Image (cartoon, rainbow, N blue to C red):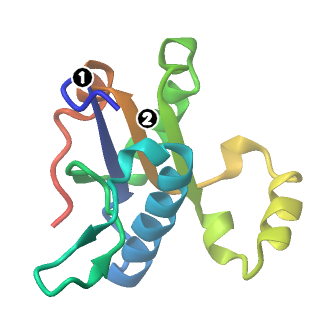
Amino acid sequence: MDYQHEKCVMVIDESLPLGIAANAAAILGITLGKQVPEAVGADVWDGSGRPHLGIIAFPVPILRGGAETIRALRETLYGPDYAGLTVVDFSDLAQSCKAYEEFTGKLEAVPEADLRYLGLAICGDKKQINKLTGSMPLLR
């Protein structure tokens, strides 16, 4: 991964309770790690010789936005100009399911317009990501 020209961000719905926001970020991060495995650094050992699994090799800003902002951003990311970006979304439907099979079964019956996105993770070209999210505030 070219760290000078690529970046990753997460955008989380600012209205979510802390626990749901943390869960959304965790789910997005796990999926992003699967989709962009080269972003995860090598395992390392501390000064005592104990191993620590590799973590992502660069910062991932966690930004905040309202539900409408996140929906508009997701819609933009479906466009052909952004086909080169890796986009992970996490919806209210996914958050409400207890098993992956339940989620996949329900998702097939729901139009995309009916989903409420709780968060997005975006990874790829830094200029494109900055254009889309550069004015968004950090989640605090």
- Tell me which amino acid carries mark 1: His
Q: Is residue 140 above or below residue 124?
A: below
Per the image, label 1 sits on a secondary structure element best described as loop
In the displayed structure, does residue 60 sit left or right of residue 27?
Answer: left
Q: Which mark is residue 73?
A: 2
Per the image, label 2 sits on a secondary structure element best described as helix
Residue lying at 47% horizontally and 27% vertically, measured from the top left: 85
Residue 86 image point, x, y percent: 50, 35
In the picture of the structure, the residue carrying the numbered disc 1 is 5
Q: Is residue 9 visible?
A: yes
Residue 72 image point, x, y percent: 46, 35
Mark 2 surroundings within 10 Å by alpha-carbon count, few (fewer than 14), some (14 through 19), many (20 or more): some
Question: Which quadrant of the figure has residue 107?
Answer: bottom right
Depth check: 68 or 30 in front?
30
Q: Is residue 84 above or below residue 43?
A: above
Q: Which residue is the extreme one toward the top?
A: 81
Q: Which mark is residue 20?
A: none
Residue lying at 89% horizontally and 62% vertically, measured from the top left: 105
- Disc with the residue nearer the chain's start (2 vs 1): 1
Residue 11 image point, x, y percent: 35, 51
